[in-house]
Image: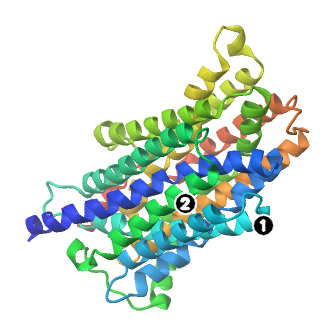
């Protein structure tokens, strides 16, 4: 019985998940264009750019609701695949509308379309994450095959698929951005999402052989979610993980303007930088699966947090001209160090997702994973707003970056703060899983 579950159904499930997460990673293709379109086409300043990009993530905060709907509301006897298809449809609709809209559209209009796009992405991500969480809970009936290994393998697979999409998306974005109009690139991505929609609706969820999850409606799912969040190991872990992002004032908009406006870094260099970053994410998924699955989640996540602070100090030296004086070209630093730091923020998500999947109670996987990603999305929004406030305090504008070095030091100090209460993260979940057996 177990062997048959891993046959055609398992392969089809991997194809559905692989496509879903690959497209999810490829979303950086239009978003790289959006940054330049807002800066050069609509002439927004650094703070406005960061506010718009942060606010566009607001639909991500609603992920617990989408998770509850996916867990409890079935569409034609299915509760995962239809939501993936709906997410692809909403994204395709929004990008295709942007593509055919006038080039001088208002900031309000493009904000609405970006919100709709992220709403669709959120719904699809919730359904995809729920499938991964469900399969992580379905372990073979043998003590020789422990749960952490199976969940880690599937998590690494979708991580690699997403990273591969990110590598290709950033590579093509960097190449196309100087050769095609923004509307053309939005059109290409919209057509890709339309293709994903038609492929997804052709798949019957029963053919994926997902584990059966009893559903008693939204009220029961909400009750189960609240019970799960009352567990100290889950509540403390998610609280720490959320705070570890929210406490950092993001200066992404300011750094984007500093690199493109002040240093005159070409858009193709930024594209290569993002490709390098996505390649390291792809490599991280492989390395984690091979060498770090058995490492304590607390130690691994704390080490990543410290490395983030270290690279922020490196950014401080970069802005002060230290590397330039050593003979390193600005473009080389942007490609390697800036590209790596941008994705290092997400390195923690892989081991933490594996950790939460192990602790997640059966029957509400979608709700718990969605709540986690909602908290992360909210944390990034708060981080973005704090970055705008910090940039205002240190008086950084689109033409004056004299206060940026001090802001980067403040950012690095804030990044180190969560490491002092990393004990909120459980150290050994395996032993708990064995006790359940």
- Asked where in the image residue 46 lies, by quadrant, the reply is top right
Instruction: Pinpoint residue 264: horizontal percent, then vertical percent.
Output: 74, 27
The percent position of residue 377, horizontal first and vertical second, equals 61, 60
The part of the image, by quadrant, that contains residue 258 is top right
Question: Could you tell me which quadrant the N terminus lies in?
Answer: bottom left
* Residue 192 visible in the displayed image: yes
Q: Label 1: few (<14), some or many (≥20) within 10 Å?
A: few
x then y, percent, for residue 314:
66, 24
Side (left or right) of 364 relative to 122 = left
Mark 1, secondary structure of its residue: helix
Q: Nearer the viewer, mark 2 or mark 1?
A: 1
* Residue lying at 61% horizontally and 46% vertically, measured from the top left: 32
Between 190 and 206, the one lying in front of the other is: 190
Give the residue at the far top of this rendering: 326
Q: Which mark is residue 149?
A: none
| Residue indicated by mark 1 | 108
The residue at 39%/50% (across/down) is 159
In front here: 327 or 314? 327
Vertical arrangement, residue 405 with respect to residue 7, above or below? above
* Location of residue 340 in the rendering, given as x and y in whole percent from the top left corner: 54, 33
Is residue 173 rendered to the left or right of residue 194? right
Q: Secondary structure at mark 2?
A: helix
* Residue highlighted by disc 2: 238
Q: Quadrant of the C terminus?
A: bottom left
Residue drawn where x is 17% and y is 55% of the image: 145
Q: In the figure, residue 76 lies in which quadrant? A: bottom left
């Amino acid at each position: 019985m177990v062997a048959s579950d891993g046959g055609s159904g398992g392969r089809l499930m991997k194809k559905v998940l692989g496509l879903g997460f690959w497209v999810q990673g490829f979303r950086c293709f239009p978003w790289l264009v959006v940054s330049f379109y807002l800066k050069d086409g609509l002439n927004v300043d650094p703070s406005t750019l960061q506010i718009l990009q942060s606010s566009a993530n607001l639909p991500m905060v609603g992920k617990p609701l989408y998770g509850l709907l996916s867990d409890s509301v079935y569409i034609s006897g299915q509760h995962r695949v239809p939501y993936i298809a709906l997410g692809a449809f909403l994204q395709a609709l929004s990008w295709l509308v942007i593509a055919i809209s006038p080039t001088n559209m208002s900031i309000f209009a493009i904000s609405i379309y970006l919100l709709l796009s992220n709403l669709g992405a959120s719904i699809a991500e919730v359904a995809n994450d729920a499938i991964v969480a469900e399969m992580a809970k379905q372990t073979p009936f043998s003590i020789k095959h422990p749960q952490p290994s199976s969940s880690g393998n599937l998590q690494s697979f979708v991580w690699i698929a997403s990273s591969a999409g990110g590598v290709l998306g950033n590579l093509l974005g960097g190449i196309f951005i100087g050769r095609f109009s923004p509307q053309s690139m939005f059109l290409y991505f919209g057509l890709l999402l339309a293709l994903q929609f038609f492929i997804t609706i052709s798949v019957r969820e029963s053919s994926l052989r997902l584990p059966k999850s009893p559903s008693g409606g939204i009220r029961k799912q909400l009750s189960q979610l609240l019970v799960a969040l009352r567990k100290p190991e889950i509540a403390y872990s998610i609280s720490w993980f959320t705070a570890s992002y929210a406490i950092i004032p993001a200066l992404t908009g300011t750094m984007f303007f500093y690199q493109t406006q002040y240093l005159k870094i070409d858009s193709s260099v930024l594209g290569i930088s993002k490709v390098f970053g996505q390649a390291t994410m792809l490599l991280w998924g492989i390395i984690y699966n091979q060498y770090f699955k058995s490492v304590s989640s607390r130690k691994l996540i704390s080490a990543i947090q410290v490395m983030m602070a270290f690279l922020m100090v490196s950014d401080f030296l970069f802005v002060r001209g230290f590397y330039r004086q050593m003979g390193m070209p600005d473009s080389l630093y942007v490609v390697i160090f800036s590209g790596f730091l941008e994705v290092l923020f997400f390195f923690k998500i892989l081991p933490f997702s594996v950790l939460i999947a192990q602790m997640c109670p059966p029957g509400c996987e979608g709700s718990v994973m969605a709540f986690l990603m909602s908290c992360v999305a909210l944390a990034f929004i708060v981080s973005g707003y704090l970055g705008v406030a910090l940039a205002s305090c240190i008086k950084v504008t689109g033409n004056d970056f004299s206060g940026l070095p001090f802001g980067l030091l403040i950012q690095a100090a804030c990044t180190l703060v969560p490491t002092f209460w990393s004990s909120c993260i459980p150290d050994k979940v395996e032993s708990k899983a064995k006790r359940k057996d």
